Image (tube, grey):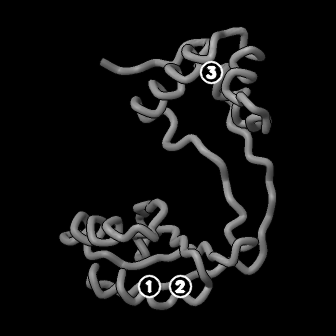
Amino acid sequence: MTFVPDALDRRIINTLQHGLALTQRPYADAAEALQVDEATLLARLQALLDAGILSRFGPLYQIERAGGRFVLCACHAPEDRLDAVIDAINAHPEVAHHYARSHHLNLWFVLAVQRAEDVSPALQRIGRDAGVEILPFPKEREYFVNLYLPA
């Protein structure tokens, strides 16, 4: 059965994209603003995650301020090995998420490490385990676009 978000689900998505208040009970406060109880809000969020409508729900960190790094990476995975390469890359805890694309560089992923000096060793391990050359594309400049996707 296909999950179809209803009006409340869309209101939750639209409202929470603007953030949660930093209070003692942020979910209770958000639920009150949405005119539902906290249990309903939490159940709806879990249902949206379980259905794949939301891929994740959580904070975004400025990892660089804590000494870490995010690096966009790409590789060419031969079509007949694509699934194996994806599995090998995703087996590494430093890999945040990946995207398959129709291009010579057909697999892209985000590397997240706790220290800047961890980037190179992590990429070497991932490339070795996946059997592909990993090309890093480090962030040169950050653009804040205030992304909002109405549901």
* Residues at marks 3 and 1 touching, judged by CB atoms closer than 8 Å: no
How packed mark 1 is, by other alpha carbons closer than 10 Å (few <14, some 14-19, many 20 or more), is many
C-alpha gap between disc 3 and disc 1: 39 Å
> Going 50% across and 76% down the picture, which residue do you hit?
73
Asked if marks 2 and 1 touch (Cβ < 8 Å), the reply is: yes
Query: In the figure, 79 relative to 41: above or below?
Result: below
Say which amino acid is labelled 2: Val
Q: Which mark is residue 10?
A: 3
Give the x, y percent position of residue 145: 80, 54
Tag 1: amino acid? Leu
Residue drawn at the location 50% of the way across and 90% of the way down: 120
Residue visible at 52% across and 68% down in the picture: 110
Q: Position of residue 3 (x, y in %)?
A: 40, 20
Query: Which residue is rendered at x = 72% and y = 64% of the image?
Result: 62
- 143 vs 64, left or right, is right
How far apart marks 2 and 3 lie (CA) works out to 38 Å
* Residue matched to label 2: 119
- Return the residue nearer the eye: 118 or 108: 118
